[in-house]
């Protein structure tokens, strides 16, 4: 995980200077571009810091070691819902909500409603029995 963490932390050294140069080129009058680049640099810090401290807590994975074998990563990785429809409903609600920013706030409230229903359904999906949709 250390490779991933240093990859994200290295984004700081790219996005911060690019944001400064971009801000200088537009005389700091166009706030979306340089602010977006600075926020992207901040996100690189957050993700890189999380991966770095997770790597210290978990230890080296088989793909991090030179003597790591493929069979060491075999087995169950996590619990995933293969037949879940809730991500589709969540994506639809998010799309309607973001479209509401352009069309009107009343459309955004419909998207927020779909999103809340989808989040509750996805969180409690396994609390209602085996693959009960």
Image: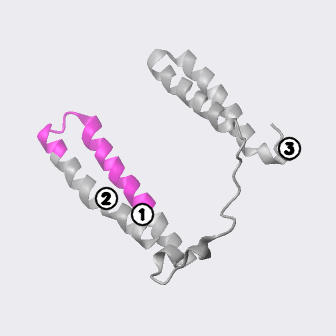
- The one nearer the camera, 14 or 21, is 14
Part of the protein shown in magenta:
22-47
Q: Is residue 61 visible?
A: no
Q: Secondary structure at mark 1?
A: helix
- Residue 46 falls inside the magenta stretch: yes
Q: Residue at x 65, y 63 (%)?
A: 77
- The one nearer the camera, 32 or 78, is 78
Q: Earlier in the sequence, mark 2 or mark 3?
A: 2
Q: Earlier in the sequence, mark 1 or mark 3?
A: 1
Q: Residue at x 66, y 27 (%)?
A: 114
- Residue 71 falls inside the magenta stretch: no
Residue 131 location in percent, x, y?
Answer: 81, 44
Q: Which mark is residue 48?
A: 1
Between disc 1 and disc 3, the foreground one is 3
Looking at the image, do the residues carrying marks 1 and 2 touch, with CB atoms under 8 Å apart? Answer: yes
- Distance from Cα at disc 2 to Cα at disc 3: 43 Å
> In the picture, residue 9 is in which quadrant?
bottom left
Residue 37 location in percent, x, y?
Answer: 29, 46
Q: How many marks?
A: 3
Residue identified by numbered label 3: 128
Residue identified by numbered label 2: 11
């Amino acid at each position: 995980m250390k490779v991933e963490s240093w990859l994200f932390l290295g984004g700081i050294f790219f996005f911060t200077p690019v944001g400064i140069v971009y801000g200088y080129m537009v005389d700091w009058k166009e706030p979306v571009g340089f602010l977006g680049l600075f926020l992207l640099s901040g996100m690189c810090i957050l993700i890189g810091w999380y991966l770095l401290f997770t790597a210290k807590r978990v230890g080296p994975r088989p793909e991090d070691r030179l003597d790591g074998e493929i069979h060491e990563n075999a087995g169950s990785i996590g619990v995933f819902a293969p037949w879940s429809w809730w991500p589709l409903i969540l994506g639809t609600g998010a799309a309607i909500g973001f479209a509401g920013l352009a069309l009107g706030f009343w459309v955004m409230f419909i998207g927020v409603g779909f999103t809340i229903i989808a989040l509750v359904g996805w969180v409690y999906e396994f609390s209602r029995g085996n693959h009960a949709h």
